[in-house]
Image (cartoon, rainbow, N blue to C red):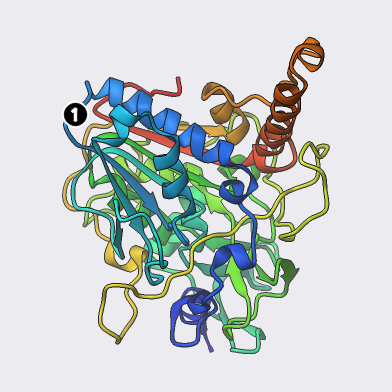
Amino acid sequence: MRGWRTATEAALYGPGGFYRRPEGPAGHFRTSVHASPLFAQAVARLLCRLDEALERPPVLDFVDMGAGRGELVTGVLAALPADVTARVRAYAVELADRPAGLDERITWRDTPPVAVTGLLFANEWLDNVPVDVAEVDPAGVPRLVLVADDGSERLGEPVTGADADWLARWWPLPAEEGLRAEIGLPRDLAWTSVVDRVVRGLAVAVDYAHTVDARPPFGTLTGFREGRETAPVPDGSCDITAHVALDACAAAPTAHTPSDTPGEAACTTCDPARTIAGAPRPPEHTPHGSSDPPDAPPGTARTPKTTARTPADVPQGPARTPWNTAQEPSGAPRALPAARLLTQRAALHALDITGARPPLALASTDPTAYVRALASAGEAAELTAPGGLGDFGWLVQPVGIPDPLA
């Protein structure tokens, strides 16, 4: 038996792993990117705002972390004005093989570029960074949960060191038997490492999220197979995922140096106790191919999931993953503007995606335009729906510029 972090990494990205399959994430899950081209258009609009804030640099970077099959970066390039497109250097960061027919302007990499001036966008990337699980034993002591390939579990050694510090700071467990937590330190370090590569611009992480004042008492670790929720079994037969402590990630870039421990991280870039713009606990995953209408009512959560992780430009051998190749911050923390947590609903509203219905008068003057506008409004409503995709967390970290979503 082994910890969930090691087991998950092998099950998803090792030989025969779930995300080595040729069908890609879209064959199993429907994310915001797949729900509507409006999502890519909103990201393109954000990149244009950055372009202005950066005073129209000769090269404007767009980095799509955990790019899946390149759907988002392709949509962003298609939505940009020609004068911006001419200066954009687009990267898809993914361990899957480069898809056939992908736009030749897109550079396919298994790690992010060293220096980014522009936008680094991580849509449902952090939830694919494997984490260990802790559970409180009968004596009230948090212990690592060990798992076998068939999904059976037993408790291992007590949580100690940096993991224990992280739990104490970000997910304190009362001494009540059976309570569980996912230890998010690997995600903090992964996020810190990619923010460290942004010279000027913006880093954004979008994911299912929770905050320290509302952690789920039994964690969120779960599995998905063919779009259906299932028990997490680390045998390569299903996806394994868990929601993200985005508030801890937000604090990490200014809290960690290579010698720091999470327990020493008193300096934060946001209030760790706040909820994500007042949002409740994010929705659970829902199946791909749902028959719910685009303007589904609150409570109809939509599918997450992204990113296959098969090595692309590297020789066969031990698989490298973005979180493993970007674990260590490069040096002392930088003085960064405050990070901000908000819901996807608030973020997309700030980018002019509102879901407002077109005026009824348009149906009389231009019926075709009215139908198109109505369909677009339905897609926007899905992306921003309370109880659904609208409750996703957005972590926004400016670097050297004001927050373009403020």
- The N terminus lies in quadrant: bottom right
- The structure residue drawn at horizontal position 41% and vertical position 48%, both measured from the top left corner, is 73
**Where is residue 350 drawn, in percent x and y?**
53, 22
Kindly identify which residue carries mark 1: 57
Check disc 1 and report its element: helix, strand or loop.
loop
**Where is residue 160 drawn, in percent x and y?**
42, 68
Q: Is residue 44 left or right of residue 91?
A: right
Q: Nearer the viewer, residue 185 or 122?
A: 122
Looking at the image, residue 23 lies above or below residue 173: below
Quarter residue 323 falls in: bottom left
- The structure residue drawn at horizontal position 74% and vertical position 22%, both measured from the top left corner, is 370
Observer able to see residue 18: yes
Looking at the image, residue 356 lies above or below residue 283: above
Observer able to see residue 165: no
Q: Nearer the viewer, residue 247 or 262?
A: 247
**Where is residue 381 drawn, in percent x and y?**
71, 32
Quarter residue 27 falls in: bottom right
The number of callouts visible is 1
- The C terminus lies in quadrant: top left
Q: Amino acid at mark 1?
A: Pro
- The structure residue drawn at horizontal position 34% and vertical position 64%, both measured from the top left corner, is 322
- The crowd level at tag 1 (other Cα within 10 Å; few <14, some 14-19, many 20+) is some
Looking at the image, residue 188 lies above or below residue 130: above
Q: Is residue 232 left or right of residue 255?
A: right
**Where is residue 95 drawn, in percent x and y?**
37, 69
